[in-house]
Amino acid sequence: MIKLSKKIILFDGVCNLCNGAVQFVIKRDKKEQFLFTPLQSETGKKLLKERGIDTIQIDSIILIEPNVVYFVKSDAALEIAKNLNSPWKIIHLLKVFPKGLRDFVYDFIAKNRYRWYGKKEQCMVPTPELRAKFLD
């Protein structure tokens, strides 16, 4: 099992919206709590398999914490926001809405993300400055 010392964000590496979200988190992760890896990467696939997360059913951002807890969809997004600096952590307050409603909105955006934001031919390659924030 891959040992984790930080929280890992798994994301769709070919999705422009997802890549933008990763860049957003990197800029606001002042405590450097997060590492990143695309769902499509070997490390991403291994992390999912080790935790028994069904990759066929997952079309989502996934947050894995060092104690093997993981979050998907709106829960993942809100947990990530909770760990960012203010004012962004206030987004976590959206957790008061029912999970079904939050995930409905999340799924709607996820379903349309390629059409609205486009996609890349291959996963994002981090710049040398950001390389340490990504797992292979």
Image (tube, rainbow, N blue to C red):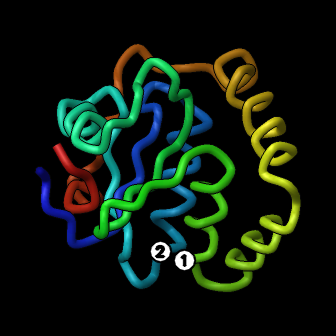
Residue at screen point 75% across, 41% down = 103
Residue at screen point 47% across, 46% down = 62
Using residue 105 as the reference point, say whether residue 55 is left or right of it.
left
| Rendering coords of residue 39 (x, y %) | 36, 33
For residue 29, the mark is: 2
- Which tag, 1 or 2, sits closer to the chain's start? 2
Q: Could you say whether the residue bearing mark 2 is in a helix, strand or loop?
A: loop
Residue at screen point 28% across, 49% down = 127
Q: Is residue 114 above or below residue 3?
A: above
Is disc 1 in contact with disc 2, using a CB cutoff of under 8 Å? yes
Q: Amino acid at mark 1?
A: Asn
Q: Viewer-nearest of labels 1 and 2?
A: 1
Which residue is at the front of the view, 106 or 30?
106
Q: Could you say whether the residue bearing mark 1 is in a helix, strand or loop?
A: loop
Q: Is residue 17 above or below residue 81?
A: above
| Rendering coords of residue 91 (x, y %) | 76, 70
Quadrant where the C terminus sits is top left
Using residue 81 as the reference point, say whether residue 92 is left or right of it.
right
| Rendering coords of residue 119 (x, y %) | 54, 20
- Tell me the crowding category of disc 1: few under 14, some 14 to 19, or many 20 or more residues within 10 angstroms, Cα based: many
Instruction: Provide the residue designation for mark 1.
Output: 83
